[in-house]
Amino acid sequence: VITHLLAKNFTLVARVFKTMGGLTYYKQFVGEKSDEPTFFAIFEFLKGEDKYDCVDPHPSLQEIKNSAVVQAEFHHAVEDLTPRGQRFEPRILNLIPEIPTKIHQNLQSPKGTIFDDYLLETENFIGEACGEAIQYFQEVDTTKWKEILIHCDFHPGNLKFEGEDIVGLFDFDWSKVDLRIFDVALAIWYFFADWRGDRDGVLRVDEASIYLHEYQSALQNLPNLDPLSQDELDHFPMLVNLGSLYVLNWAVTDFYANDVDPELYLKWLRHCVRFAQWFSDKGQSLLERELIN
């Protein structure tokens, strides 16, 4: 991905130094009994400031606009990329049906933490939210929606800044081929789903509208990749909801697969559930009324 971006004059990424054999990585079996290789890579230093985390970012108006333009330019640069590999993860519309089953299976072997307690408490609601999303897309023809290589983790914590200008984009390990609109919707969820107090999970719609408008405007002036179509925009709010469910799935999967902090992961899980609750209550209609129009 990085090699392709640099070839297309997208210069916000850190170049990968090649080995003497011309590869961008080095593979080595570490340990006497290791049957799984470890991969090493050396990257060019990426200049700029790490101004934000993925938790509760509040970028300025100009940073919001600049971020949307960078995502548009990234999509434009990769729209003709056919990757040699693929991340081992289903496309988003195939992933959502798996989430309730995964949650139920993990709760059969709980860790006995506050994370397990909250997940058990909200299991039925999460299942209902996934079910509603599945039913929604059964009635939507997505075959004409653009599929490209997406970043799939585009948020302020993966951008580097000089002042309000963006000078770096990194962390491509979640990248995969999927719906382009999902990448935009997921970015909007990361950028604008609030984390603070009673507003936890509430999307800052005014800022999200600015981001979406700037993304669309940037592609008006670029060849080969059109802005999101009206048909895509008509279903955009539900794609933002899928973004939240996608991150919820990560939180559950990662929690049960690794030795991690239950309080930190509970924060993520609660954030995703609260967004889903807000979206079900009034968020969907609000986004349909104010984000798209």
Image (cartoon, helix red, strand yellow):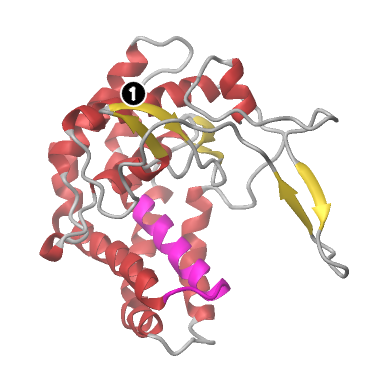
Q: Residue at x 16, y 42 (%)?
A: 205
| Boundaries of the magenta span | 242-261
Seen in the image, is 265 located left or right of residue 26?
left
**Magenta stretch, overall SS:** helix
x and y percentages locating residue 167 in the rendered image: 40, 26
x and y percentages locating residue 56 in the rendered image: 25, 53
x and y percentages locating residue 221 in the rendered image: 35, 9
Q: Is residue 218 above or below residue 147?
A: above
The one nearer the camera, 274 or 44, is 44
| Image quarter in which the C terminus is found | top left
* Residue placed under numbered mark 1 in the picture: 69
* Image quadrant where residue 226 sits: top left
Q: Is residue 55 above or below residue 180?
A: below
- How would you rate the neighbour count of disc 1 (Cα within 10 Å): few for under 14, some for 14-19, many for 20 or more? many
Secondary structure at badge 1 equals helix
Residue 291 visible here: no
Q: Residue at x 48, y 50 (%)?
A: 93
Seen in the image, is 254 located left or right of residue 31?
left
The one nearer the camera, 62 or 154, is 62
The one nearer the camera, 161 or 156, is 161
Q: Residue furthest right?
A: 32
Q: Residue at x 56, y 72 (%)?
A: 258
Q: Residue 188 magenta-drawn? A: no
| Image quarter in which the N terminus is found | top right
Number of numbered labels in the structure image:
1
Seen in the image, is 176 located left or right of residue 208?
right
